[in-house]
Amino acid sequence: MLEKYLKLLLIISIIIISSCNEGEFDGIRFGLAYAPQNLDPRFSTDASSTRLIRLMYRPLVDFDNQQMPAPALARWERLSPTHYRFVLAAAGRRFHNGMTLTAEDVKATYDSVLDRKNASPHRSSVALIESIEVSGQDTVDFKLRKADPAFPGYLVIGIIPKALIDQGHDFSASPVGSGPFRFKSGFVDGKLTLERIRDKKIFEFIHVTNANTRVLKLLKGEIDIIQNNLPYELTQYLESKKNIKVMHRNGSNFTYLSFNMRHDALKDKRVRLAIVHAIDRERIVKYMFGAKTRLAAAIFTPDHWAGDPQLKSYDYDPQKSKALLAEMGYTKANPLRLVYKTTNVPFRVRIATILQHQLKEVGIDVKLRTYEWATFYDDIKKGNFHLYSLSWVAVKSPDIFRYVYHSSSIPGSGGKNANVGANRNAFIDRLVDEYIEKAENTYDIKQRIHYYQKIHKRLIETIPVMPLWYEEHMAAMRKNIHHYQISYDGSLDSLINVTKSPK
Amino acid sequence: MKTWFSISILLLWMLMAVVGPLLPLQPDEVDLSRKMQGPSAQALLGSDDLGRPLLHRLVYGAQTSFFVSFFVVGISVILGTFIGAVSGYFSGVIDLVITRIIDIFLAFPGILLVIALAGLLGPGIENVIIAMSCVGWVGFARLARAQTLSLVSRDHVQAAIALGSRPFTIILKHIIPLISAPLIVEATFGIAAVIIAEAGLSFLGLGVQPPSASWGSMIRDGTAYMLVSSHIVIVPGVTLMLVVLSVNLLGDRLRDWFDVRTRLKN
């Protein structure tokens, strides 16, 4: 009798448990290492937000394979050096709230970015716009304060509806754009949900900080795709798993070692030369990064239109380093002493420890100082460092040369660009300034490339920074995920085509 | 058996800390071609994520944990005992003020205060010692005060007062010797707590700076590779556990030994 009741209880339990199952999720889950900070295209600066924003909003201009500006929402013509006309294309002009994207929305978006009250971090990149005039539903004219041949490449901010801007809508909490993905919910419990408009497929972007946890979730099937921010050893580990496929692609994020030119020792070029010849980049790349990581010679990769495929960087030559240090009077008893600052991210500390060890081999005594990001970045912006390493991420437009290497871009220099530049190591070189200015003032693309290549060469000669490498992009996904491709800049654009087959 | 186990582990720990720097070890020698290798003849406990021998780093890490616990517990015992004894002896306003300060310190979770202080002072082992000592004295002060209160009315203390001894002489000669037993027991538990706190701070990047080794920083470095080379985190983790367990077992043993009733029962 008791056995009968127990069997009945078991059957009821099974029915209850199976009825509780919500059914298998047939959408796609993407693991994010960093949570997006702001989903409003006027204010986002972090990489996660920028990549998600590209899915939800469309900009006027995008970049082609060579990173040249290319039409996205609009094509353009230059009426005069300070007057550009943009005509909106027919496709991609339906906002997710049903409204049609018009020239008024374009004007409202850029007016909002330019409005000092809004304090948009992108304001400086479009500050040369003097006025924006709408002529018809599809045409908008940009008039500039000064000529800038690279101008169309600055109009990469996603367009948002004027009506919602006027209402003070919170685009970060509830994004409304005209991109291929529609916002559904988020960012709640570390999860953002988007819907691919084409087929109403649901995509969940799940924030998982810890790399081990992200890998375990992928293996268990709680996440379908992850991209970047994994130690190389974990990538290799995933490659050995039969239900996972791993992809690699050349990256363009430029990692460099910066020297503070205000420092008594570092302003001597021989000291910088001794450092660059002491660092064995090939060995670091071989053991610490994936096979697609490339040694860098300049801020732009050789395949970028403003890059220089012939450019040669520095060789590993510890004997030369030792000779240079001896020539300057540094000995074992009196070594060159420097401080290297880095973030407390374990991988960055690991790289810093290798650099420290390699420099010690030639007799340079480097102390490491690790800080959390805000403190570290504050010190770097204030020029409070000897050495540090950082990366430039998704750099596409050559206006970066002025931002990083022009003498007027030294933060707090009191110049026109005071506090907005990123020449944090106070590098001043008359020739580099001259080449940057000449490139800015010519519309002949060949001439511009010519000057950019001169800048590259001059930077190799003067060594304000040591180019290290372009880290590869990697993505790992479950085998039932198809059509995912890693893009050149690590964006998530190929999610537009991704499909998932049943397990 | 338990006691001998604890004493052996602790002696080994001290030996590693004191003799380690005299040995020809290379705890900071990066060799990328050996990274994450398991135990072998060249590296008995294997190598870490930069190819450094784990055994060598373990020995140097012992030095860090030993000196941090020695200094922090030393400073905390001296400071806490003195403040607690003064508070208990004088009573009145002095006692009230000191007790309130102790209460305020106890109201915050100790490790959070240490993290905040270490964050303010900046990373570095000296700052870790300062931060932990700033928080560590409180427990000793509370214990010393309670013990002092029970001793102040004793005949020998009253006799010393009647004979005109100065208060600080009475505290030093007639009170502190009598309250030392529970304080020593508390100190042993304090050592265990400090070893763990130092490891925690180094884990968070607030302790020793690379490339110097500490057990906490070794565990932090190892956690990133748990899936591929678990020995990197197991080696310092088990070592830390053994030392903390030994200190706690020894503390238990000392407490039993100081307790006359337990001793008589046995």
Image (tube, rainbow, N blue to C red):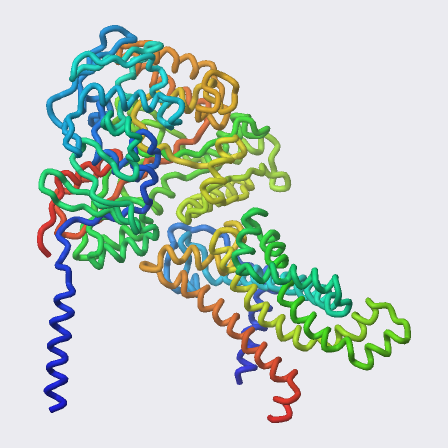
Residue A128, position in %: x, y?
A: 35, 15
Q: Closest to the observer: B73 or A353? A: B73
In which image quadrant can residue A142 be found?
A: top left
Taking the spot 71% from the left edge, 75% from the top edge, the residue there is: B179
Q: Closest to the observer: B217 or A417? A: A417
Taking the spot 18% from the left edge, 33% from the top edge, the residue there is: A179
Q: Closest to the observer: A459 or A192? A: A192
Most extreme residue toward the right is: B163
Residue B85, position in %: x, y?
A: 73, 68
B50 over B261 or under it: above or below: above
Is residue B22 among what the camera can see?
no
Residue B173, position in %: x, y?
A: 81, 73
Judge left or right: residue B208 versus residue B37. Answer: right
A406 over A49 or under it: above or below: above
Looking at the rendered image, the quarter that the C terminus of chain A falls into is bottom left
Taking the spot 78% from the left edge, 78% from the top edge, the residue there is: B153
Looking at the rendered image, the quarter that the N terminus of chain A falls into is bottom left
Is residue A141 among what the camera can see?
yes
